[in-house]
Image: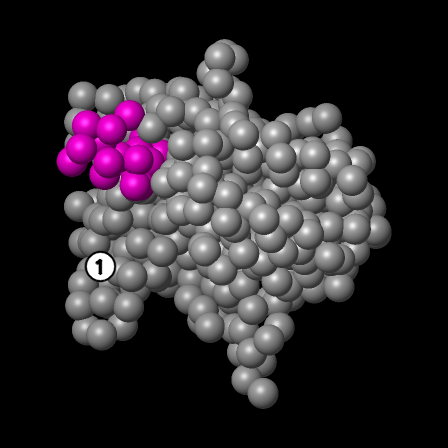
Amino acid sequence: MNTAKPLAGIRVIAIEQYGAGPFGSMQLADMGAEVIKIENPVTGGDIARQSGPYFLGEHDSDFFQTFNRSKKSLTLDLKSSEGRKVFERLVQSADIVMNNLRGDQPAKLGLDYDSLGAIKPEIICGHLSAYGRDNDRASWPGYDYLMQAEAGFMDLTGEPGTPPARFGLSMVDFMSGVTLAMGVLGALVGVLRGGQGRDVDVNLFDVAVTQLTYPATWYLNRGHETERVARSGHPSTVPCQIYRSADGWVFVMAMTEKFWQILAEGLGRKDLLADPRFVSVADRRANREQLTEILDAEFSRHTNAYWMECFAGELPLAPVNSFTQAMSNPWLAQTGMLQPLPHVDNSQFRVLASPLKFDGNRPAGIGCSALGADTGDLLAGLGYSAADIESMAAERVT
């Protein structure tokens, strides 16, 4: 069995903060890339290290470790002349430089291909910003929630007639990070085939708008405005929503005629198949409320566990779990989705594992290094002497 990780030997420099950028570079670290976080020695590094409410020692937190698995930490003042020299030497040894700064910052800090291509023509410069680097909003700060608001997500989320609502998680951040990881890997393939490096740009707003997918296509071509549907229902397919069970809610997705038949038969309601109100998808959509009333009554006869067993593997169905129930789901342990990540301040520390598998195995990982813990080794690897390293530390360059 091949135990080597696919990105082993690839070096990534990450100038990143908080969530979106670190989530993207962590995908590369999971696949074996050596990801080196550049952290400011004066400000205490990535702000995520100070993000509570739960902390691991003086310069670490549960939040930080969530997004920085298997990375190294190099403290370096990029704005100092000596720090810049160190950075440029590091670039010569790297394959990818990633950042998630404001759109106007990479050029100012010399992190774009115009600046770094002269140092190494094969270098790939990945940029993740709020609104991009080439427009009137380049200097604007931005966050996930703002993108959900402006891109229309909040208008589509929640029950009809209630105030706009955001997702419970920062999915625009996470999708943007993964999109950047995909983009720089695509550019890397080009370099490995003999091409040159380049800039790769991703921004939160573009990624958010892109997720509008088919509702956007419907609007652009048909003028159709997708609206909220009660019970988190699908805009066109019925039944595809939540229904009341004896102990909560169950989500049913009868997306095909086959599944509609399995649902009716499993409920002991084959009569619904011949009911003229529900014969076709269009009929069921036109009579959604009547069907909801009927299916509520049927599902309310038993618990979620009963229905999961009844339809296991036959009908797309899931319990609507509370957060605690979701995290206590034995399926997580059974499939290896809970990963030990021992920390010096908590030997029992755990995180969710990578969703990737290679040859049937999830990539192993370790916690991110303490702030600046890898600085000495990395600088020595670049040819700096012990005296040089000590001097730069004393001058707060590192």
Badge 1: how crowded within 10 Å, few (<14), some, or many (20+)? Answer: many
Q: Is residue 302 visible?
A: yes
Q: Nearer the viewer, residue 284 or 312?
A: 284
- Compared with 201, 160 (above or below) is above
Horizontal side of 101 relative to 366 (left or right) equals left
Q: Nearer the viewer, residue 189 or 243?
A: 243
Q: Position of residue 238 (x, y in %)?
A: 47, 41
The verdict on residue 215 being magenta is yes
Please say whether residue 174 is visible from this viewpoint.
Answer: no
Q: Is residue 176 placed above or below 387 in the rendered structure?
A: above
Q: Which residues are magenta?
A: 205-225
Residue at (60, 53) in percent of width and height: 270
Question: In the structure shown, which secondary structural element does the residue marked by tag 1 occupy?
Answer: loop
Left or right: residue 268 compared with residue 356: right
Frontmost residue, 14 versus 326: 326
Q: Is 222 colored magenta in this rendering? A: yes
Residue nearest the observer in this picture, 106 or 22:
22
Residue drawn at (34%, 21%) of the image: 150
**Quarter of image, res 106:** top left
Q: Residue 331 at what x, y percent from top left? A: 73, 58
* Percent coordinates x, y for residue 144 in the rendering: 44, 28
Name the image quarter holding residue 45: top right
Q: Residue at x 76, y 45 (%)?
A: 304
Magenta portion: prevailing SS class: helix
Could you tell me which residue is drawn at 24 percent across and 22 percent down? 137
- Residue that protrudes farthest toward the bottom in the picture: 1
Residue 234 lies in quadrant: top left
Tag 1: residue type?
Gly
- Residue denoted by label 1: 197
Quadrant of the image containing the N terminus: bottom right
